[in-house]
Image (tube, grey):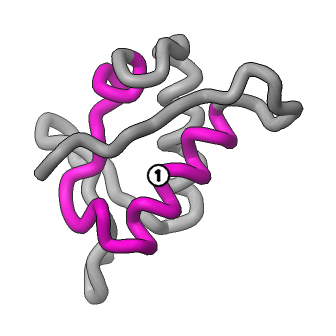
Amino acid sequence: MPPVELAIDVTSPVHPYVQIANQLREAIASGEITDLVPSYWDIVKETGCAYNTARRAMKVLIDEGLVVAIPGRGTFVRQEGDQ
C-alpha cells in the first residue's frame, strides 16, 4: 500500500489536526485507506506537525467511530461488525 499523501496548509485558518483528520477521513471514504491507518510517527514525518497534533487528528477519527486503535498493533479502519 503506498503511503497516503498528507499535507498541512499553514495559511489555512483550519487547525492542522482538523486538516489531517479531514484528509484521513477522505482517504478512508475514497478507499485509499482500507485497513491500517498511518501511525502517529508516519503522520509527523509526512506533515512536519507535532506528535500531539497527529494524536489529536487520530482521536477525532476514533471518536467518530471511523477507526479503532488496537494497542501494540496500530490503528485500523473500523469494518462493519467491529465493536
Q: Main secondary structure of the magenta part?
A: helix
From the viewer's side, name the closer residue of 28 and 65: 28
Q: How many marks?
A: 1
Q: Position of residue 44 (x, y in %)?
A: 41, 19
Q: How busy is the neighbourhood of tag 1: few (under 14 within 10 Å), some, or many (20 plus)?
A: many
Q: Write down the residue under mark 1.
A: 24
Q: Position of residue 37 (x, y in %)?
A: 29, 49
Q: Residue at x 35, y 16 (%)?
A: 45
> With respect to residue 2, does 55 lie above or below?
above
Q: Residue at x 24, y 67 (%)?
A: 34
Is 72 left or right of 75, judged from the image as shown? Answer: left
From the viewer's side, name the closer residue of 21 and 13: 13
> With respect to residue 72, does 23 lie above or below?
below
Amino acid beneath label 1: Leu
Residue 23 counted in the magenta span: yes
Q: Which residues are magenta?
A: 17-44
Q: Residue at x 41, y 60 (%)?
A: 27
Q: Residue at x 81, y 37 (%)?
A: 14
